[in-house]
Image (tube, rainbow, N blue to C red):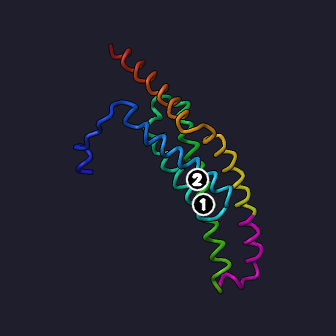
Amino acid sequence: RQRVNHWQIPAKEFDALEDGLKRTYGRARKAMGNAYDNPTMENFHEWRKRVKYHRYHAFLLKRAWKPVIGEHYTQTKDLSDYLGDIHDLDILKRLATEEPDFRDLPCTPMLLELIDRRQANLRGQCRKLGSLLFQEESGALADRFAGYWRTWRERKRSKTS
């Protein structure tokens, strides 16, 4: 925190964010494909991490056009929450099947069925939302967001002149 005021950022305006935006978006997009091609707990958890990284970039840009980028940010937050719920249910499922005190309870089979059902529902929601959020190539998303940024900055400059 003390050093942040002394950071030197060589690029100006949108250029300072563009490469990171492309990278985090592209990695989240790829992680989504991996999660559905090989639906393991690890792959869904990795997708969640990548979505969160991308969400932070959307947060930095949302003032450029709040109705669009702000909504994109909100939807990435929702997606990371759903993915977090899938992960939490995986942990509960592991406890229910591996811990003797839990495993031997009469209600455990019903609990496992409910966990499976909820995870299937959440994975479906994640697929729909992820398909909307990550349908573009990373360069196309960056170009679109750059256009919003430039328009926002131009409007801001003209208001102060």
Q: What residue sits 62% from the left and 65% below the top?
A: 41
Front one among 73 and 43: 43
The magenta segment: 101-116
Q: Secondary structure at mark 2?
A: helix
Q: Which residue is mark 2?
A: 31
The answer to the question of whether label 2 and label 1 lie on touching residues, with beta carbons closer than 8 A, is: yes
Q: Quadrant of residue 37?
A: bottom right
- The circle on residue 22 is none
**In terms of sequence position, does the residue under pointer 2 or pointer 1 come before the other?**
2
Front one among 12 and 160: 12
Q: What residue sits 45% from the left and 32% below the top?
A: 63
Q: Which residue is mark 1?
A: 43
Q: Secondary structure at mark 1?
A: helix
Decide: few, some or many residues near mark 1? Use Cα within 10 Å; few <14, some 14-19, many ≥20.
some
Q: State whether residue 118 is above or below residue 149.
A: below
Q: Residues under labels 2 and 1: Cα distance?
A: 7 Å
* Percent position of residue 118, x then y: 72, 61
Q: Quadrant of residue 74?
A: top right
Image quadrant holding the C terminus, namely top left
Kindly report the secondary structure that dominates the magenta region of the rendered protein: helix
Front one among 70 and 141: 141
Q: What residue sits 75% from the left and 62% below the top?
A: 117
In the rendered structure, the answer to whether residue 54 lies left or right of residue 37 reads left
Front one among 124 and 137: 137
Identify residue type, mark 2: Ala
Decide: few, some or many residues near mark 2? Use Cα within 10 Å; few <14, some 14-19, many ≥20.
many
